[in-house]
Image (spheres, grey):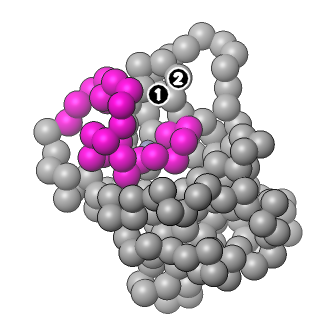
Amino acid sequence: MLPLTLKDIRTEFRSASMAELGLPDLQNIDWAVLDYFGWIHQSGSSAFVIMPVEEEFSTLRLGRIVSNSGRPRTRMCSWCHHVYRSRGTALFRTTVRGSDGRRSIGNHICRNLDCSLRIRNLTSDPPTYLPETLHIQRKISRLQASVLTFMSRAKVLPES
Ligand SMILES: [Zn+2]
């Protein structure tokens, strides 16, 4: 995706203060390898996603639950299909827009929102537990489609 500026991000999350956003240093982001920009607030319990959708941006404000209890088990990221041998995903939840906070949806996603790096094998930790012989372009399309589906369920996509 094309690089985002601080101004772009603040425009998209107008209601959030800088402290609430807890942005990483944008200078250190390699935008060219990202399909969406996602980051975790330093508190660890909230997260944000911005993805270009039809020349605009769609965004998600997420709550993040990392579970370190219970027996570790194989988990797959719902967005990029990276399979972790034990822990590696977290539960990300968002409230459905227009539901007055009554309805929420959730997905198990790579806990650092680094799906784009995982499908390109750019992370330093072990590769997926179940490798796929799928062309990178197909993986990118699948990842984008999964994020779009989640955004659609959260009702944050532009009206079409
Ligand atoms: Zn992922």
Residue drawn at the location 55% of the way across and 76% of the way down = 5
Which one is in front, 15 or 71? 15
In this rendering, position of residue 126 left or right of residue 138: right
What span is in magenta?
Answer: 109-132
Mark 1 crowdedness (10 Å alpha carbons): few <14, some 14-19, many ≥20: many
Residue 35 magenta-highlighted: no
Q: In this view, does 118 lie above or below 47?
A: above
Q: Mark 2 points at which residue?
A: 87
Position of 114 with respect to 131 (left or right) is right
Residue 21: x and y, percent?
A: 73, 61
Mark 2 to mark 1: distance in Å?
Answer: 7 Å
Dominant secondary structure, magenta: loop
The image quadrant where one finds the N terminus is bottom left
Q: What residue type is labelled 2?
A: Arg
Front disc: 2 or 1: 2
Q: Is residue 9 left or right of residue 16?
A: left
Residue 6 to residue 108: above or below: below
Circle 1 residue: 75
Hey, what amino acid is under mark 1? Arg
Which residue is rendered at x = 80% and y = 60% of the image? Answer: 20
Which residue is at the front of the view, 149 or 63?
Answer: 63
Where does ligand 1 appear, by image quarter?
top left
Residue 113 part of the magenta segment:
yes
State the image coordinates of residue 66 (x, y, percent, origin top left).
67, 32
Q: In this view, does 15 lie above or below 22?
A: below
The response on whether ligand 1 sits within 8 Å of label 2 is no
Left or right: 43, with 147 as reference point = right
Q: Marks 2 and 1: CB-CB under 8 Å?
A: yes
